Every structure is written in C-alpha cells, then in structure tokens.
Image (cartoon, grey):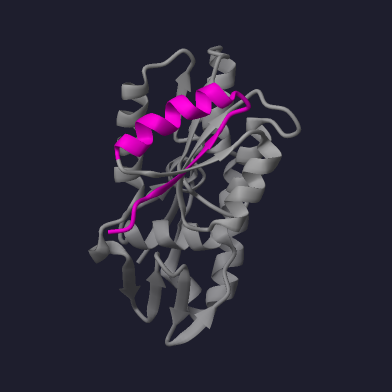
Amino acid sequence: MDRLKILVVDDEARMRKLVKDFLVKKNYDVMEAGDGAEALDVFFENQDIALIILDVMMPKVDGWQVVREVREYSKVPIIMLTARAEERDELMGFELGVDEYIAKPFSPKILTARVEAVLRRSIPDEGEAVIEYSGVKLDKNAHIVTIDGTSVDLSFKEFELLSYFMDNKGIALSRDKILNGVWNYDYFGDARTIDTHVKKLRSKMGDKGDLIKTIWGMGYKFE
C-alpha cells in the first residue's frame, strides 16, 4: 500500500522538522511548505495529499486564507497548529472547515495520534466508495456522478451534497445537520446556502432531482 502523503505548513523550519520526523516514523510521506503561498502551490500540484497540517500565522498568505482557498476545491482533512489559543480563533477554524485544532506548544505524540484519528475518519471503506440508487451512481474515489449511464457535471460542493444525501438515504436531514456534514459548519452556517445548492443540484439531475424531497420547516430527505 502506498504511503499516505501529508503536507506540513509552518514558517518555522524547526517546527516543520519536528512534525516531519514524528510522521516519517509512522511511515507517512511528508511534504513541506514555509508559507501559505507555497502551501497552495504544493497542494494544487499534488492532488493525492491526504491531510494538511497548517500553521495560522505565516507570511504572504496566512493559514485562514489557505483553508478558504483549499475548501473551494477539496474536503481534504486539515489540522491547524497555532500559538493563538483564543476561543474565537478556534471557532473560526471550525467555521472555515478545519477538522482539528491544536495549540502550540503540543506533544508530537498527541499530534500523530490526532493525525491517525482524522485519517481514519476521512478515508472511506472500499465498500462505501461507490453508491448507486435508482439510476444515480456516485463514485467517491473517482469523483464522478452518472445518471442512467450519462455523466453529470457537478461542482465540488454539489458532489459532496449528493454524496451526503445518498449516504443518508431515507433519513430526514435538518439544514443544520447538512451544514455540519457537508460544510463542516456547526452553529455558523447560513441555511440559505443549503437551499441554493439543492436547487442547483436538482436542476443538474433532471428528473432524478425529484429524489431529493423537501421536508417543510426542517430540511431534506433523499428517497
């Protein structure tokens, strides 16, 4: 099995080396970036990165902006490392879609344990990689959706939304639950985001868009 690739981003070379040394011992393939701009270049040149470990305070482009740009295209797990342990910074991280938030100084052993836990949650079982229902086929690994054999061009968020609906087929989902599951928002999401994306998704799915039922006053159900 190929080693999972992790991108470590920090403007302090000593910190990058510390994190890298512990991850390499756990048999991960580690890439490095010294600032946010370099991190974005490395990430978009390497589509097989499994996880990003990211500092907040960096020159050129800070960690928050890196998260914003990555989340436009990818749901790759992100662990934030920061010396700023204030609650509002932590809440901002989760609002933007960060998976874990670890304040400096930290134990490298704890960090590697968090890395393993996040990766376990993010890598789907092979049996769950392809979902099919009523002519709609979704391949999580290839990021492809077909309807009755015809490919459908979905945006990243539309794909994630459809995947979430199909994973929870037959279950009534509130807007808050969908925000938390797809956008990683907890209490900060805007429910109108859901309605806008559902409308676009239904339109692209044609007649199959009717599989997404509206539950008035609550949210949606895929059935």
* Residue depicted at 35% across the width and 52% down the height: 172
* Residue depicted at 27% across the width and 59% down the height: 1
- Residue 53 in view in this figure: yes
In which quarter of the view is residue 32 placed? top right
Q: Against 19, is 204 above or below?
A: below
Find residue 158 and report its horizontal and vertical position in percent. 54, 61
Q: Horizontally, is 195 left or right of 214 in the view? A: right
- For the C terminus, the quadrant is bottom left
Find residue 5 and report its horizontal and vertical position in percent. 43, 49
- Residue 188 in view in this figure: no
Magenta range is 1-26
Q: Against 170, is 103 above or below?
A: above
Numbered disc total:
0
* Residue depicted at 37% across the width and 81% down the height: 135
**Outermost residue toward the bottom in this view:** 149
* Residue depicted at 36% across the width and 17% down the height: 107
Residue 41 part of the magenta-drawn span:
no
Q: Against 33, is 134 above or below?
A: below
Find residue 197 and report its horizontal and vertical position in percent. 59, 58
Q: Horizontally, is 105 left or right of 95 in the view? A: left
Q: Nearer the viewer, residue 41 or 215?
A: 41
In which quarter of the view is residue 213 placed? bottom left
